[in-house]
Image: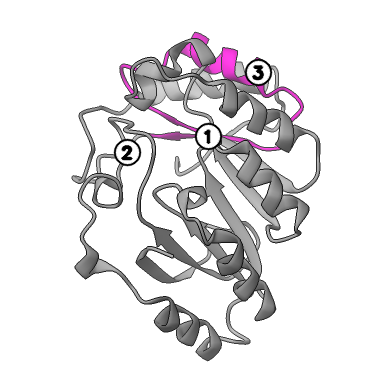
Amino acid sequence: MRIHGLQKLTLLDYPEHVACTVFTAGCNLRCPFCHNAILVTDILDTDAIPEEEFFSFLKKRRGMLDGVAVTGGEPLLQPDIAAFLEKIRDLGLSVKLDTNGCYPDRLKKLLDAGLVDYVAMDVKNIPGKYAETVGIPGFDPAPVKESVSLLLSGSVEFEFRTTVVSPFHTVEDIEGIARWIRGTKRYYLQNFVDSGNLVGHATAVPREVLFEMRDRAAAIIPSAALRGVD
C-alpha cells in the first residue's frame, strides 16, 4: 500500500465511529478543485508511511479506535487494497472506504468479500459535465454510473457526496445529480474550501446559492443536507 498520510483520530470522517484516517497516494482524476494535490500530482516516495508502521499504530490504539477511514487519492488504485483491508478487519476494526466510483468491479469485489462496512462515494457532477469537472477530456462516466447502481442496490451502508465548486456546478446540476441518485438515504453537499494545495483553480459557491442547491436536492432526496456549513 502506498500510504502517504495518517490522521490519528477523527470523529468526523467515519459517521458514528471513533476512527483514524489513512491517506493513499495516486488518483486517476485531475479535479481542478482537489484539495489533496500532494496525493495526486506531487507524490514523493520520501513521504510514504511503511505499512508495518501503520499497523503498529493500530495495535497500540486497540480499545480506543473502532474504525478506519481509507481515503486518497483513490484507494481502489492500490493493487493490494483487499489484503490491506483484511488486515484492518482482523484487528476487529470496521472500514469506511472513500472512492470516486471509477472502479465498480474492484469495489464490488471488496463488498462481496465483506471487507467494507461503509462507502462514501463522490459524485462529481451530472454525467454530461463529468469530463470537465474531473479534468479529464473525453472522460466516460459509465463506470461511475455502474458504481452508483451498485451502491443503490443496498449491499452496504453508503453515502453520496458532492463538493460544490464555482464555476463547475449550478443549482440545476445539483438537482440533476439528485435525480440520478434518487433512492439514496444519504446525500451531502459540501462547499469548496481552498486548502492552498490544489490541482488547479476554483472558488466557493456563495452561501445563498449553496442553500438553494440543498433545497433543490432535498425536494428529490428528503435527507439531503449540507456538510461543514453552520
Q: How crowded is mark 2: few (under 14 residues within 10 Å), some or many (20 or more)?
A: many
Within 10 angstroms of label 3, few (less than 14), some, or many (20 or more) residues? Answer: some
Query: Where is residue 63 drawn, in percent x and y?
Result: 63, 87
**Looking at the picture, which amino acid does disc 2 mark?**
Cys
Residue 1 falls in image quadrant: bottom left
- Magenta residue check for 95: no
Task: Measuring from the top left, give residue 52's x and y in whole percent.
Answer: 44, 82
Left or right: 94, with 4 as reference point: right
Could you say which is closer to the camera, residue 81 or residue 179? 81
Query: For the residues marked 2 and 1, what is the alpha-carbon distance in whole angstroms?
Result: 16 Å
User: Depth check: 174 or 148 in front?
Assistant: 148
Dot in front, 1 or 3: 1
- 190 in magenta: yes
For the residues marked 3 and 2, what is the alpha-carbon distance in whole angstroms? 23 Å
Horizontal relation, residue 66 to residue 155: left or right = left
Q: Do the residues labelled 1 and 3 touch (CB within 8 Å)?
A: no
Question: What's the mark number on residue 180?
Answer: 3
The magenta stretch is 162-191
* As drawn, 150 above or below 126: below
First-in-chain label (2 vs 1): 2
Identified at 36% across, 77% down, the residue is 50
Question: In 3D space, how far apart are the residues under numbered discs 1 and 3 (Cα atoms)?
Answer: 16 Å
SS label for mark 3: helix
Q: Name the residue under label 2.
A: 34
Q: Residue 56 carries which label?
A: none
Lateral position of residue 128 relative to residue 109, left or right: left
Residue type, numbered disc 3: Trp
Q: Which residue is drawn at 50% across and 38% down?
A: 100
